[in-house]
Amino acid sequence: MSRYALVAAVVAADTALLWLDGTQGPALAAYAAAYALTMAAADRRPFASFLAALALAVLTGASLALLACTGFQAGQRISTRRDVVVTAGAFTAYVCVLLLVEERSPGEQDPWITLARVALLTALPLLAGRYVAQEREHQRREKALVAEQERLRERLRIAHDMHDSLGHLLSLVSVRAAALEVGQLPADQRQAVRGLADTARAAAAELHEVVNALRGHDVLGLEEIEGLVARSRAAGASVVFETSGEAVPLADPRAAHAAYRVVQEGLTNAVKHASGLPITVSLDWQPDALLISVTNPVPHRRPSSGGGSGLRGLTERVAAAGGLLRVHAEPREFRLVAMLPLVPALAGATA
């Protein structure tokens, strides 16, 4: 039904009720015009139209179709606390006035009949309009969620393409650089080739991390640190893994993931700058914090103390988890130290 047809139907229905009730002449025409104006304004000013419909219902004792339609439209527009207060106040005032009029009318009428009419023609349309509005909002959010899932699937496809193409090319660069490294090259060129191989491996590792982020894999945490150490050992690194204190589960996954990334970054730096030298990974569980350190000797030159993008990003990740990250570059030793606050999963259970 079009908007104009609805207005005409409401005006005709309520005017017919007034005519059957005995209203005729100019009064009937005035009420019909008021019905039409109220319905016409309901789209732009639903609450004002609803208040006008309540007033007309009190004056005429009818306006039943107008009440139902304006109440339904007002219910669809309720979105703030102010809207709720205005609607509830108007509805309460209407019920009180209606009961007062019925009480003072010559023919005594059962108040329950009046309340039933109010519920059917006023409260029910308001609730129905609110329900329809909530369903529309729910459908809108579902469409937005479907669109977001489509975007995520596109990101996943891009991640696969990146991994298949760029990963393959970086692997070829790394293999060829490794072959040149063991060949008969002058010392300065061998050093340059070694740097090229390290750069290719670092780029491949960064690509793998970005692809994992795009794929939305599960967040790596404390449980995977031992596996990370084991993979480093299998690759030829000499890693000592130490733990002390009583391990406490971390309720915040960001803190657990930050701990994993600290160890990963420390092992990566150690392998890059101190290849073949022993590396010590330590997890120290204090009463209120987890202390993580990755230590390795410095063979010839001291590594940068935080100029790399990897350490900058790691500092931000640890800070987001409520912790601190420090780099100690000593003349003979390099240490990456992090402090992460403990948030026991069962905090207060033993209090």
Image: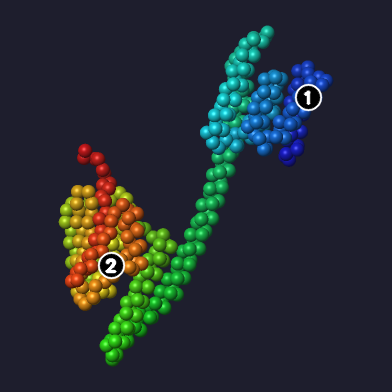
Element marked by disc 2: loop
Residue 186, by quadrant, is: bottom left
Q: Residue at x 39, y 60 (%)?
A: 217
Splitting the image into 4 quarters, where does residue 273 fall?
bottom left
327 on left or right of 66: left
Between 345 and 269, the one nearer to me in the picture? 269
Question: Does residue 26 appear left or right of residue 116 in this picture?
Answer: right
3D distance between C-alphas at marks 1 and 2: 85 Å
Say if residue 158 shows up in the picture.
yes
Residue 11, which numbered label?
none
Amino acid at the residue labelled 2: Ser
Q: Quarter of the image containing the C terminus? A: top left
Dot 2, crowdedness within 10 Å: few (<14), some or many (≥20)?
A: some
* Residue type at the position of mark 1: Ala
- Please state which of residues 65 and 205 is positioned toward the viewer in this rendering: 205
- At a point 53% along the width and 48% down the height, the residue shown is 141
Give percent across and percent down for residue 229: 24, 66
Give the side of residue 100 with respect to residue 339, left or right: right
- The image position of residue 305, as x and y in percent, is 28, 67
Please give the residue where the numbered disc 1 appears in the rendered image. 30
**Toward the viewer: 301 or 35?**
301
What residue is pinned by disc 2? Answer: 305
Q: Is 135 above or below relative to 291?
A: above
Task: Tell me the quarter of the picture where residue 133 sits.
Answer: top right
